Image (cartoon, rainbow, N blue to C red):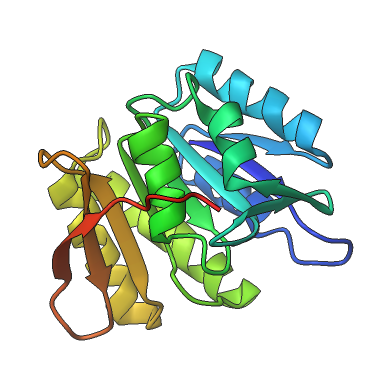
Amino acid sequence: MFIIESLRDGEYKDGERLNKILEMAKINSLYRWVTSKTEFTDAIKDFNKSGFRYLHLSCHADETGLEVGGEEISNFDLIDILEGNVRGRRIFLSSCKGSNLHTATVVIQKCKGQSVVGTPIDIYFHEAALFWPSFYYVINRIDKEKMNQQSISESIKKCVDLFEVPINYYCKSKTKGYINRYKFKSTSAPDKKLIKIAENIR
């Protein structure tokens, strides 16, 4: 697990804590704190070279892009940064409203990533600090070697029911111009829909 984190001064560094928990659980991880768009770009390139298959981003976000070191990285900029660096990889977003159609379109459609997982709403730091270590621990118990659609869905469902944090899981579709979206909410079966990709990335 390659973890990149960038938050505002004084905010709880849930990505740093996640890294320490993964180390205790003997789950291989690498942590990078970044303070600018340039450092973020370099960290993404290092992720590509690292051989890690999973990227965990802890930062502020919305449908228009990410915030890193107080700088806004638009979805257009994000395409330039991620293209060639996330092909076939899975991205997990610990950020408010990070898992949305625009981000999924950037990662999966534009940059050939495999999937995007995260919350579609605002999330408190204590919720992120509890949810993500639990998710990675559960999925590692299911299969230490790899993640697949079944293990991801099963692990998300367990943690969503426990912490009552809604999660969106986007993945590639065989239908051109569309992405599969699974919406997970507490105590209910995931809602699967074939979603048309965002035509205008803001």
Q: Is residue 66 left or right of residue 136?
A: right
Q: Quick one: which residue is furthest to the top in this view?
A: 49
Q: Residue at x 28, y 63 (%)?
A: 156
Q: Is residue 32 visible?
A: yes
Residue 145 in picture, x, y percent from top left: 25, 30
- Please determine whether, in this image, residue 15 is positioned above or below residue 96: above
Looking at this view, is 51 or 175 the one in front? 175
Q: Is residue 90 visible?
A: no
Residue 83 in picture, x, y percent from top left: 50, 25
Looking at this view, is 26 or 99 the one in front? 99
Looking at this view, is 25 or 16 the one in front? 16
Q: Residue at x 69, y 28 (%)?
A: 41
Q: Is residue 44 left or right of residue 117?
A: right
Residue 21 in picture, x, y percent from top left: 55, 51
Residue 106 in picture, x, y percent from top left: 44, 42
Q: Residue at x 78, y 39 (%)?
A: 34
Q: Residue at x 14, y 65 (%)?
A: 192
- Please determine whether, in this image, residue 150 is positioned above or below residue 90: below
Q: Quick one: which residue is furthest to the right in this view?
A: 9
Residue 195 location, quadrant: bottom left
